[in-house]
Image: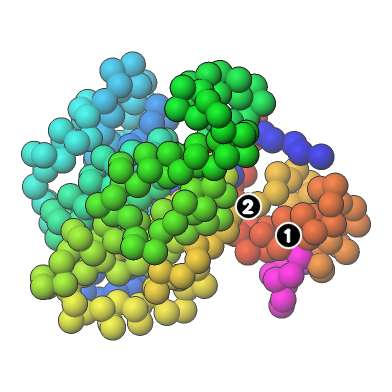
């Protein structure tokens, strides 16, 4: 019993609000002046993230980088502020000529997984000024298993010359070895020493592997011998048409790490030690359901059980999934966006 709303991206919207919450905490600090910041992102055709940052922090300058000409034209049509600068360029090319304007907020929001994205992440970390925020979001879908029933025979033909005499089970194992070798060859410079082939075969191990790769990339960008470090603030994973991993941190002086940790210590979505990423998986609810549930929020214990009793029926076929979805709603209901159909 699934009811995907393809035009709504509530998990993504919550990820945006988590970034905004980090900025809200920053702006309460005496040494931080939000007008010193410039936001850089990939706004997409409707500039959603840029609009949210502008609405919450209007003093921040905003830059959107877009390489596709057609999408760039749509951005020009949807431009909403004189403080928004639209740049029609490839991000790698833009980054090659980038120089700091003061302090920065970068959101590298990617729709595919490439080594180049990790390299961009490292380059950004090396170029921004201290107390800059850097967020990167990457797909977290494990490499596909090409030995599925639909293309099994085709793949068998590709390998038959090498493994002509092998049984199917042996062939599968050799295929896994080659798949891991391909992944290892591409990402070897940021691959943790403890990484193993099974890490790229299932969803959760792959998410954790990607986070470890980002951690290693940040350490390579800001060497231990330098003055700056990348202090992780939040790590989340969610489904946005495909599984995604999103991490956010601050580039800061080593001597200020303890102070910055104090700034965020009471934020309930904090992740300072590269622990397992927080899961975002809110249910699709009607406005009537939300208004009914919000009469009972916040709850003392975020278990989903109280809301389940208040609702009186399941929103998913399985009891475990139903409870988990309501537990997620208890955690994120304040950031859950309202979408409405408007006739103009």
For the point 74% across and 70% down, which residue is it? 303
* Label number found at residue 281: 2
- Disc 1 is placed on an element classified as helix
Determine which residue is flagged by label 1.
Answer: 324
Q: Is residue 2 above or below residue 302?
A: above
Q: Is residue 339 visible?
A: no
Question: In the picture provided, is 245 more to the left or to the right than 232?
Answer: right
Residue 106 x %, y %: 28, 50
Residue at 85 percent across and 47 percent down: it is: 317
Q: Secondary structure at mark 2?
A: loop
Residue 337 versus residue 310 in the image, above or below:
above
Quarter in which the N terminus is drawn: top right
C-alpha span from label 2 to label 1: 9 Å
Q: Is residue 318 left or right of residue 168?
A: right
Tell me the quarter of the image containing the C terminus: top right
Q: Which residues are magenta?
A: 296-304
Comparing 132 with 120, the one in front is 120
Magenta-colored stretch includes residue 186: no
Question: Is 166 situated left or right of 52 in this image?
Answer: right
x 50%, y 62%: residue: 277
Whichever of callouts 2 and 1 sits on the residue coming sooner in the sequence is 2
**Residue 321 visible from this viewpoint:** yes
Task: Give residue 219's position: percent from left, percent from top.
Answer: 23, 64
Q: Please tell me how crowded label 1 is: few (under 14), some (14-19), or many (20+) other residues with Cα within 10 Å.
A: some
Q: Is residue 158 left or right of residue 228?
A: right
Predominant secondary structure in magenta? Answer: loop
For the residues bearing labels 2 and 1, Cβ distance under 8 angstroms: yes
Among the 4 quarters of the image, the one containing residue 331: bottom right
Indicate whether 207 appears above or below 22.
above
Residue 286 picture quarter: top right
């Amino acid at each position: 019993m699934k009811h995907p709303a393809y035009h709504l991206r509530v998990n993504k919207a919550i990820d945006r609000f988590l970034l905004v919450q980090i900025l809200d905490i920053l702006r309460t600090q005496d040494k931080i002046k939000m007008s010193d910041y410039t936001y850089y992102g990939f706004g997409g055709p409707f500039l959603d993230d840029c609009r949210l940052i502008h609405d919450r922090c209007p003093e921040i300058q905003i830059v959107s980088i877009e390489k596709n000409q057609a999408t760039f034209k749509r951005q020009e049509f949807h431009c909403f502020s004189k403080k928004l600068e639209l740049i029609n360029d490839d991000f790698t090319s833009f980054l090659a000529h980038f120089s700091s304007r003061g302090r920065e907020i970068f959101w590298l929001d990617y729709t595919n997984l490439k080594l180049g994205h990790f390299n961009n992440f490292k380059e950004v970390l090396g170029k921004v000024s201290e107390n800059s925020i850097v967020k990167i979001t990457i797909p977290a879908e494990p490499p596909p298993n090409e030995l599925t029933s639909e293309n099994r025979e085709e793949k068998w033909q590709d390998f038959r010359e090498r493994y002509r005499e092998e049984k199917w089970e042996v062939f599968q194992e050799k295929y896994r070895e080659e798949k891991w070798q391909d992944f290892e060859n591409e990402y070897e410079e940021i691959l943790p020493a403890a990484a193993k082939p099974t890490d790229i075969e299932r969803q959760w191990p792959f998410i954790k592997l990607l986070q470890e790769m980002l951690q290693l990339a940040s350490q390579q960008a800001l060497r231990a011998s330098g003055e700056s470090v990348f202090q992780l603030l939040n790590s989340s994973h969610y489904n946005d048409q495909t599984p995604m991993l999103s991490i956010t941190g601050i580039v800061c002086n080593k001597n200020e790490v303890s102070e910055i940790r104090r700034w965020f210590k009471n934020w309930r979505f904090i992740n300072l030690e590269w622990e397992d990423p927080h899961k975002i998986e809110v249910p699709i609810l009607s406005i009537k359901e939300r208004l009914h549930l919000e009469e009972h929020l916040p709850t003392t214990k975020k278990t989903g059980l109280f809301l389940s009793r208040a609702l009186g029926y399941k929103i998913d076929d399985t009891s475990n999934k139903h409870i988990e979805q309501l537990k997620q709603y208890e955690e994120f209901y304040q950031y859950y966006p309202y979408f409405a159909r408007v006739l103009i």
